[in-house]
Amino acid sequence: MGKKVKKEVEPPPKDVFDPLLVESKTAATVVLMLSSPEEEVLAKACDALYKFASKADENRVMLLGLGAVEHLYKLISHEDPIVRRNAIMVLGIMASNNDVKKLLRELDVTNSLISQLAPEEDVVIHEFATLCLAHMAVDYTTKIQIFDQGGLEPLVGLLCSPDPDVKKNSLECIYLLVQDFQSHAAVRALNVIPPLLELLKSEYPVIQLLALKTLEEISKDGETRIILGENKGLDCLLQILETNEFSDLHVEALAVLGNCLEDAHTLQLIQQTGGLKKLLSFVEDSTVPDIHKNAAKAITRAAYDSENRKILKEEEVEKCLINLLETDNDGVKVAASEAISAMCENSASKCALGRQGIPRLVQLLSSDNEEVKEAAVTALANLTAASPSNARAAAEADIIEPLVNTLDAQRDGAIANAATALTNLAAQEPFRVNMQSHGVMRALAAPLRSTNSHVQSKAAFAVAAFACDADARTELRNAGGLGPLVELLHSKNNEVRRNACLAVMVCGSDELTAVELCRLGALDILEEINLSIVRKNNYSEAAVENLLNNNLSQKYNRMGYLSSSNIITDGFYDCGQIKPGVKFLSLEELSMQELTDQRAIIFINAKPKERLVLFDLLAFFAIAHLFYRFHCFQYKLRMYIFFYVRKGKVKKEEEKMKEVAQIISKAQDEINPENSHWLPPADLILLDYINDASKTILPLTTTRGQVVALAQFVADKMGGPIERDKLHDFSWELHISEIEFELKSNVVPIGKVKKGTFCHRALLFKVIADRIGIRCTLVRGEYNRAWNEVELVDDSPQGIAGLLLPAKKYIVDLMFEPGFLIKRGSAEADQYKHI
C-alpha cells in the first residue's frame, strides 16, 4: 500500500469576509441592522425586535422613535419568506400602539398586509398580518381602505384556517368592518354565514363571542336574516340559550335573535317551533340585566310591525314586560318602558298593559334617573292616548301630581310626553278639573318658554286642551303664560305654529284673556300669518275670529261691524277707526291721555263700581264698630270712676280703639284707587236708560214693535228727530266738546251724550237692544255714519193662517223718522248710510 499523503486545507478566498458574531445590547443598534443587505441579519434583527416589542408598550414607543416602523414596512414585502414573516410579526405586535397605527396609515400599509393573506402564505404570516389589520381596523378610514382594497374576501376565507389565532384575528377584523353598513352586502355575497355558524362550535370562547357579535351586526340586514334562517342559525342560537355552560354567550345570542324577531316571517317560524315561548320564558327566568335589556329592545324593534305585534300578543308578551319594570336596573326599566310604548299600537295589548302596567309606570315618574322618567312618561302617554279606560286607571293610580311635576323634568322628551299625557287625561272633565287644582296651567307656562320645538308643540296643545275652562285661562294669565304662547306664533315650525294658533283660539274665549292676548300682539301676528299661503292654517283664521268676538272694542275698530251675536258688555268703547300700524290702546291708556281736539272715545259702563260700594259697607261697619267700642269705653270709664276699677282695664279699651282705627285705615288703603285695578267710571244715566227700556219696551209683544219703540227711545235721548235739510245745523260736535272739557278727558260715557249723531245713536241702540234681547247689528260707515240692521218677519197675508215668511233685513232709522224701518238695499237705505 502506498503512503497516505495529508490533504492540505485550502485558504478562503481573499475577497471573502470572515463571519463575525456580534452581540448587540441596544435596540438602536438592532434597528440599524434592519438596513443590512444580508437576509440572515435581517431575520435575526426582526426576531430580536419582536421579542423586545412584545415585552411592553414603552418598548414599542421606543422602536417607533428609532424609525423601526419605516424599515419594517419595507421588509414585509421582502423576497425571503423568513425575513418577511419576522417583519410582519414585529408590525403585528407594534400596531397595538396608537402612534404606530397612525404612522402605518400614513405609510398606506394595508395593501401590503392584504397581499400577505394569500392561502399559500405561511400560517404565522396570516396570524400577524390579520392581527395588524385588526388593530388598524378600529379607525374608520382604515376600514374603508381595507374594504376598497379587497381585504374582505381573503379575511372571510381565513375563517376556515386550521389555526385558531388566524380565525380569531380574521374574525375580529371582519367584526370591525361590518360595523360599517356598506360591508353587510359584501359579506353576505361572500357567504359568511356558514363559517360564522361553524365558529359558534369552537372550543375557544373568544372566537364564539366574536362570531356572535359579528352575527349581531350583519343580522340587522333583512336579507342576511333570511340566509341565517335557511342555514338553521335560529336553532343554533336557541340551543346556546338552552345550554347553561354557554351562559357567557347568552347576552350576544339573544341580541342576534332579537334582530331576527323584526321579520314577521322569522317571528312566525320561531313561534311555530315553540322557540318564542322558550325565549320569553328564558328572559323571565334570567337574572342578568343585559339579557333583560336586550330582550326588551328586541321586542321594541319587533313591535314596529303590526303582524309582529299580533304574534307577541298571542304569546302574552305584556306579562314579561310588566315584570321587567320591577327590576332594580334602570337600563332594563328604560328598555321595558320603550317596549310597552311600541306594543301600545296594538289595542288589545294597550288594554292588557294598562290594567297592570300603569301603576308601575306611575311609580317610575318619581325616579331620580331622568332617562327612566322619560321612558315611563312616554309609555304613559301612549297608553292613555284615545283610551278612556287607561286614563281612568292612570287617574286611580294618582298620576296627576307626578305628571304635573314631570313638566319640570330635565329632559325635553320627558316634558313633551308629560304634556301629551296630561292632554290625554284632559279629555275627561273630572280629571281636567283635578289637574287644574294641581296648578297644571302654571306648570305649563315653563314648557311654553322651551327652545325645543317638540316641547313647544306639545305644551301649546296641552294649553288648548285645558283652556276651555275659564279658571284655567285665568291661571295661565296670572302665571304669565300668555306671553310665551304669543311668541310661539312666530315659530317657523308648522306644528308649533298650528298648535299655538289653536291655543290662542281657545284662550281667547273670554274678554279678559282676549284683550290681554291682543295687547301682547297676538292679533297682529295672526293677521300676518293669514296673509301667507304657506303659514296660515284653519286655527289661525279661527283664532282671529275668536279674539275679535271676545274683544268687541277692537273688532269694531278694525272691522267696523258687530254681528247680532256680538253682545256689547260693560267696558266696550268706540275710539273710531284708527290708521293701520297705529297701536290700539286700552281704555285705561286712553283715559290717561291729555285732552285733545281729536274724536271723543265713547265708552259703555252701566255697572257701578263694586269696590266703592264695598268700601262704603266696610266704612259703615267699621264706624259702627268704633261707636260701639267708644260707648262701651265711656260706660266702663264711669264704672271705673265709681268702683275704682284697675287702670289696666282702661288702657286695654284704649288699645282696642286704636285697633279699630287701624282697621279703618287699612280698609281705606285697600280701597284707594292708586292701589286698585283701574275701572272706568260708572255711567248711571245709561243704567237708567236700560232699566227704563226693560220696563217699557221689553213687555211689547212683537219684535217689530220693540224695535220701533227702542228707536224712538234712543232718538229722544240723543236730541230727537232731525230734518234732513237741517242735519248740518245739528251741533253735536260742540256738545261733545263741552262734555270732554267738563270731564277733562277724551273718554266720554255714552249716557252723557244728549245730542248724538248716527254713530252715537246706533251704538246706544245696539247696547240697549243687547240688554233687552233684540238681535241687531252695528255697522260703521264713513264720516261718523253708523246704522243698525235687524231681521224681521212680516205678518202673513190675510186669509193664509200659519204661513211662515222668510225674514227680511231692515235698517233702523234713528235720525230722521225714528222707528222707520228701511229695507236693506233700497235707495232710501243707501241715502241713510251715505252723505
Image (cartoon, rainbow, N blue to C red):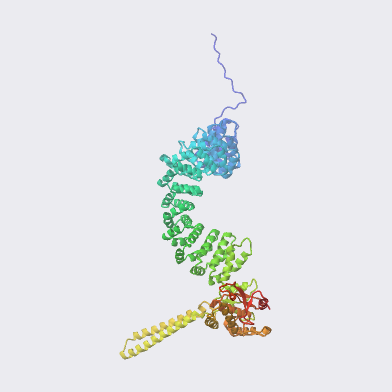
Q: In this view, does 107 lie above or below 393?
A: above
Depth check: give the residue in front, 700 or 637: 700
Depth check: give the residue in front, 471 or 632: 471
Residue 331 lies left or right of residue 520; in this view the side is left
Instruction: Report the residue at 56% width, 13% height from top.
Output: 5
Count of marks placed on residues: 0
Instruction: Report the residue at 42% width, 57% height from top.
Output: 359
The quadrant holding residue 362 is bottom left
* Residue 492 percent coordinates (x, y): 60, 60
* Residue 722 percent coordinates (x, y): 64, 84
Q: In this view, does 541 lie above or below 93?
A: below
Q: Residue furthest left?
A: 643
Instruction: Report the residue at 36% width, 83% height from top.
Output: 652
Residue 731 lies left or right of residue 612; in this view the side is right
The quadrant holding residue 639 is bottom left
The quadrant holding residue 38 is top right
* Residue 775 percent coordinates (x, y): 57, 75
Q: In this view, does 340 lie above or below 777?
A: above
